[in-house]
């Protein structure tokens, strides 16, 4: 680990007692954006668009999928649930086909009205695919368009290398200083959490993001904490700028692993997405009264140059 520069304090990775109640006061929060998936057919185009930018060139991290645009076989809403489905198939007729043997979908809120936020409480209720070889994710990217400089918050991602991987999930942060591609202060900040029924039952994947820290949990239990360092540089804390939400199921790749020969299709099911403004005022140790923490929107920018 590279030594911390003068005036900068390292952030903690494990949840201290201070975040044990990270969903307390929830009844007072203001819901600012949601999708209950109560319309049949393709996802609501006023809330979701599709990331297909790298189909022809191939996706990062050795991923094997073609991400389809407005294709019900890969993204479909029925009976109050969104299904993001990965399939073994080739879409040779598509103009941006890049030779992939699998299809899937990558939904995002970028550049849509109200679809970018700075701070808030994010909750996504989902059931994950059980198949090895799949890499589902619920995450945020900074709108600036440069990865990892503009930040990435992984609320949930699940490896697919082994059957055991399907019994847990992980949370992670990526910044210019902390990233797996060679950050100056070490690898990405991440933690793994056991969820034995992740692919057989729905669970609530949650993020509490303020101007002072980021806490990630499952079913109201926090397991990841990153506190903003004192006098943090942007390379360490780019999380004071708007981010947008992504939902996707990648195939293969560095965290998905080898796809079994017998694989045909599997899906991440999403019951709802809810985003709240943190209107609860917390008392600081010095007795000062901080301002409430909003979930605010902003205009977007280009797709990041690299991300998972």
Image: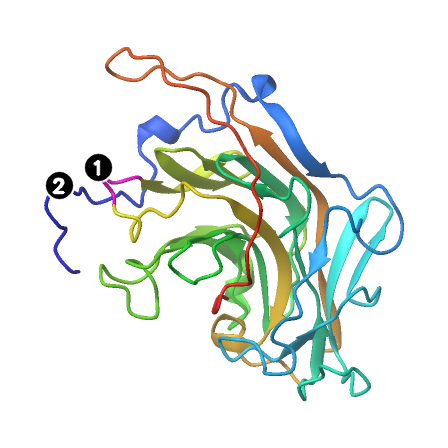
Local SS, label 1: loop
Image x and y of residue 258, in percent? 56, 81
270 vs 24: above or below: below
**Region in magenta:** 228-232
The reply to whether residue 63 is in sight is yes
Image x and y of residue 177, in percent? 28, 58
Tags 1 and 2 in contact by the CB under 8 Å rule? yes
The reply to whether residue 132 is in sight is no
Image x and y of residue 25, in percent? 52, 18
| Crowd band around label 2 with a 10 angstrom C-alpha radius: few (<14), some (14–19), many (20+) | few
Q: Nearer the viewer, residue 109 or 138?
A: 109
Q: Residue at x 80, y 49 (%)?
A: 44
260 vs 141: above or below: below
- Which quarter of the image is occupied by the N terminus? bottom left
Local SS, label 2: loop
Q: Which residue is mark 2?
A: 7
Q: Does 229 appear in magenta?
A: yes
Q: Nearer the viewer, residue 135 or 131?
A: 135
Q: Residue furthest top?
A: 287
Q: Residue at x 84, y 56 (%)?
A: 42
Q: Which residue is mark 1?
A: 230
What is the chief secondary structure element of the magenta stretch? loop
């Amino acid at each position: 680990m590279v030594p911390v520069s003068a005036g900068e304090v390292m952030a903690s990775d494990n949840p201290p007692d201070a975040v044990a109640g990270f969903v307390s006061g929830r009844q007072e929060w203001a819901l600012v954006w949601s999708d209950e998936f109560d319309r049949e057919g393709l996802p609501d185009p006023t809330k979701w668009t599709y990331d297909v930018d790298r189909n022809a060139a191939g996706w990062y991290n050795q991923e094997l999928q073609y991400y389809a645009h407005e294709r019900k076989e890969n993204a479909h809403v029925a009976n109050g649930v969104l299904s993001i489905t990965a399939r073994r198939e080739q879409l040779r007729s598509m103009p941006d086909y890049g030779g992939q043997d699998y299809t899937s979908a990558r939904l995002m809120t970028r550049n849509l009205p109200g679809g970018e936020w700075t701070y808030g409480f994010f909750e996504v209720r989902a059931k994950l695919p059980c198949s090895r070889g799949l890499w589902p994710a619920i995450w945020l990217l900074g709108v600036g368009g440069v990865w990892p400089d503009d930040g990435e918050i992984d609320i949930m991602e699940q490896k697919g290398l082994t059957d055991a991987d399907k019994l847990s999930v992980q949370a992670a942060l990526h910044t210019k200083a902390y990233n797996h591609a060679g950050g100056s202060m070490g690898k990405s900040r991440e933690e793994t959490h056991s969820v034995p029924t992740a692919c057989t039952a729905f669970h609530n994947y949650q993020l509490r993001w303020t101007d002072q820290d980021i806490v990630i949990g499952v079913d109201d239990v926090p397991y990841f904490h990153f506190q903003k360092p004192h006098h943090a540089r942007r390379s360490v804390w780019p999380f004071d700028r708007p981010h947008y939400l992504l939902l996707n199921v990648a195939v293969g790749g560095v965290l998905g692993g080898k796809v079994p020969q017998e694989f045909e299709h599997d899906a991440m099911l999403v019951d709802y997405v809810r985003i709240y403004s943190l209107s609860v005022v917390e008392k600081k140790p010095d007795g000062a009264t901080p301002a409430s923490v909003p979930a605010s929107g902003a205009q977007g920018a280009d797709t990041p140059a690299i991300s998972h």
